[in-house]
Image (tube, rainbow, N blue to C red):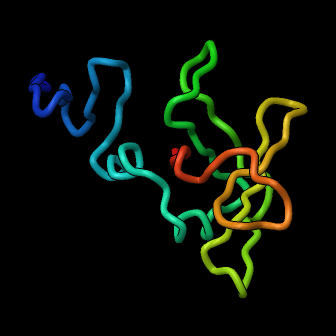
């Protein structure tokens, strides 16, 4: 029988940690849920990964987008990155940081890997 224990705002049932606000996580991916995406993590993104905005919400909760290709990087500007993203059926935009050749729609610090 699993015991329900509370530690640091999470209720623990076996190996699964459940937040009182509906978020659940296991120990292995807990660091990705609470932290900001770093530049190195952004450069290693693949086309099938999902990103979640930290503050913007829709009717289903926090906004989730799908990476729509490999991130664009530059050798002359290693701090600059542009990630193509898709939201819904017809909306496409860019996530990134630094000076790029096109304007960036959303800063990198507002997103995290799901």
Above or below residue 51? Residue 12 is above
Residue at 60% in and 69% down: 44
105 or 30: which is nearer to us?
105
Q: Quadrant of residue 84?
A: bottom right
Q: Residue at x 72, y 74 (%)?
A: 73
User: On screen, 30 above or below 47?
Assistant: above
Q: Which residue is drawn at 49% across and 56% down?
A: 37
Residue occupying the point 58% across, 27% down: 56
The residue lying furthest to the right in this view is 90
State which quarter of the image contains the N terminus. top left
Query: Hey, which quadrant is residue 80 in on the image?
Result: bottom right
Indicate whether 100 appears above or below 89. Answer: below
Q: In which quarter of the image is residue 111?
A: top right
Q: Nearer the viewer, residue 69 or 18?
A: 69
Q: Is 30 situated left or right of 7 in this image?
A: right
Q: Which of 26 and 32 is in front in this view?
A: 32
x and y, in percent, of residue 55 in the image: 51, 30
Tell me where residue 65 appears, x and y as whole percent.
68, 39
In the rendered structure, the answer to whether residue 19 lies left or right of residue 23 reads: left
In the image, is 21 to the left or to the right of 92?
Answer: left
Outermost top residue: 59
Count numbered badges in the picture. 0
- Image check: 55 left or right of 93? left
């Amino acid at each position: 029988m699993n015991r329900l224990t509370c530690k640091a705002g999470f209720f623990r049932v076996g190996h699964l940690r459940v937040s009182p606000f509906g978020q659940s996580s296991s120990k292995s991916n807990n660091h990705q849920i609470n932290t900001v995406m770093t530049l190195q993590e952004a450069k290693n993104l693949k086309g099938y990964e999902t990103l979640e905005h930290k503050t913007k919400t829709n009717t289903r909760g926090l906004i989730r987008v799908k990476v729509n290709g490999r991130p664009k990087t530059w050798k002359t500007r290693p701090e600059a990155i542009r990630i193509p993203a898709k939201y819904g059926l017809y909306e496409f935009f860019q996530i990134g940081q630094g000076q790029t050749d096109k304007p960036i729609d959303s800063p990198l610090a507002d997103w995290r890997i799901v």
